[in-house]
Image (cartoon, rainbow, N blue to C red):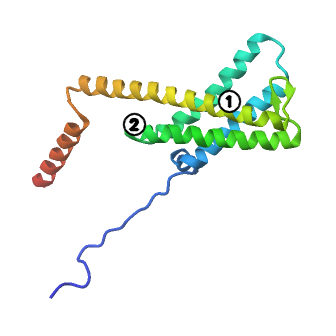
Amino acid sequence: MAPFFPRHTIEWKLEEPRFVRRLAVSLIPMGILTGILAHAYRWIVLTHRPGHWWLIFVVLAGHLAILLGLTTAHLGNHPVRQWVWRAPMFALVVSVTESVLAALLIAAGVERIGTTVAQWNDWRALSLQIFLFRESFVLVFALILAAVVQWVRFVLLKREHRLSTAMAMHEVREEEDAAKRAR
């Protein structure tokens, strides 16, 4: 007769990831946050009308730092082979968010194109520009980041004289099995 109750009970401890980690892992909320932060940064800087040409480069560098930094925060939580679809989708979510935010700011009469106030007839061109630049920056950056990640993994594995991560996992498993048998 089969036992109805197990002889040994196992206590499961479920740890919920922190809010920031859950946010960084999920594509849509992270893309929305990135789009809002990037567009808000650009909008705040342009409302102060940078007068010097070098401030334009500071604005561009800050915008790219926000965009690519948050892209890294999202992609870094996933395997490189998933970046093929995650990077374009992330850029699409960022672009749509920025376009919607631009439409809301145009409706409020405060959206800027350079130093001038944007009108509704500017929205289509502004959205296309947002899409093309965000998509190209994120895709090129993801490609470079993937190459760097793979190169670093290769160098680290080579330094440890392992051919692949699978071999390392197999070695750890063998050691664990040997330790269990020794008990």
**Marks 2 and 1: in contact by CB < 8 Å?**
no
The mark lying in front, picked from 1 and 2, is: 1
The x, y position of residue 33, in whole percent, is 65, 43
**x 15%, y 45%: residue:** 174
Please state which amino acid type lies under the numbered disc 1. Gln
Query: Element under label 1?
Result: helix
Quarter placement of the N terminus: bottom left
Query: Element under label 2?
Result: helix
Cα–Cα gap, marks 1 and 2: 28 Å
Residue 170 vs 1, above or below: the answer is: above
Left or right of 117? Residue 130 is left
The residue carrying pointer 2 sits among few (fewer than 14), some (14 to 19) or many (20 or more) residues within 10 Å by Cα, namely: some
Occupied quadrant, residue 42: top right
Left or right of 55? Residue 133 is left
Occupied quadrant, residue 61: top right
Of the pair 129 and 170, the residue shown nearer to us: 129
Q: Which mark is residue 153?
A: none
**x 57%, y 37%: residue:** 91
Left or right of 24? Residue 97 is right
The x, y position of residue 169, in whole percent, is 23, 42
Q: Which mark is residue 80?
A: 2
Q: Residue furthest top?
A: 53
Please state which amino acid type lies under the numbered disc 2. Val
The x, y position of residue 73, in whole percent, is 53, 37
**x 62%, y 26%: residue:** 65
Q: Which mark is residue 129?
A: 1
How many marks the image carries: the answer is 2
Lower position in the chain sequence, tag 1 or tag 2: 2
The residue carrying pointer 1 sits among few (fewer than 14), some (14 to 19) or many (20 or more) residues within 10 Å by Cα, namely: some
**x 30%, y 73%: residue:** 9
The x, y position of residue 145, in whole percent, is 45, 27
Residue 17 vs 81, above or below: the answer is: below
